[in-house]
Amino acid sequence: ISADGTLYISHDLTSNRIAGGGGYFSSMSDAQIDKLTTSDGQKILKLSDVFDKYGKSVKYIIEIKSKDQRTIEAFKKIVDKYDMKDNVVVQCFELSVLKELEDYYPDMPKLHLSLDQGSFENALTKDYVDILGVESSMMTTSNLERAHANGKKFNAWPLDSESQIKTAIEMGVDSYFTGYTGKALELEHEYRNEGNNESE
């Protein structure tokens, strides 16, 4: 979120890595962020730019990077403005954020990101968590089975090798994040379809 309350698309909380400087988005105005460019000359997109371009033709997985109330309120405002509540899966490391959004968007799927087993165990018991997302080292049959037994889907990240993606497919992981989308689609077609399982 910018100092002006606008949501921008960035993995990092600062623009340093993608734009070679600038600092925290939260301390920059929209005008300052809009002047930044990435190493290949692209501007940093607002969430509204993405909604304007793709509309309701796609589903979005949006990670809220902060439990700051300004960010949560800005997310609600833009989702409501574009009427995207049925097109968004929201994810966050913070359970409190997902709980608040459950109260506001009860039908929006919520994905909790877990970096350790304790975090996974905690999220497993929360009725407002629909998808349990785990760091790839936690992609185990036991965790998958426990997620399913609790009525939740199982997600893993990042799966950035062919062997990891094959393992996920063989295990029956419901979804995953990868930097190799093209290869993943090939493997999904080749391996997931063999068992006539549906994939996401």
Image (cartoon, rainbow, N blue to C red):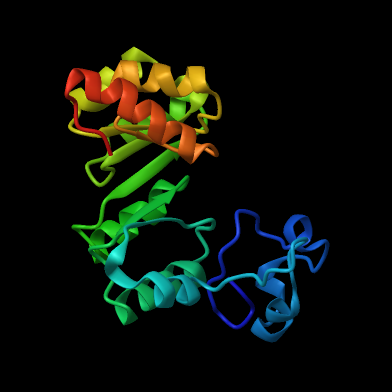
What is the residue that sits farthest to the bottom in this orientation? 31
Q: Tell me if I can see residue 121 in this picture.
A: no
Q: Tell me if I can see residue 149 in this picture.
A: yes
Image location of residue 40, percent across then percent down: 74, 62
Residue at image position (71%, 74%) is 27
- Residue 131 found in image quarter: top left
Between residue 63 and residue 187, name the one nearer to us: 187
Image location of residue 158, percent across then percent down: 52, 33
Residue at image position (25%, 34%) is 199
Q: Is residue 48 left or right of residue 194?
A: right
Relative to residue 75, is residue 18 depicted above or below? above
Q: Is residue 92 left or right of residue 82?
A: right
Between residue 3 and residue 51, name the one nearer to us: 51
Relative to residue 83, is residue 72 depicted above or below? above
The quarter of the picture where the N terminus appears is bottom right
Q: Is residue 15 left or right of residue 91?
A: right
Residue at image position (43%, 32%) is 184
What is the residue that sits farthest to the right in this orientation? 21
Image location of residue 47, percent across then percent down: 48, 71
Relative to residue 138, is residue 78 depicted above or below? below
- Residue 126 found in image quarter: top left
Between residue 169 and residue 186, name the one nearer to us: 186
Image location of residue 172, percent across then percent down: 28, 22
Residue at image position (44%, 67%) is 72
Total tally of numbered discs in the picture: 0
The quarter of the picture where the C terminus appears is top left
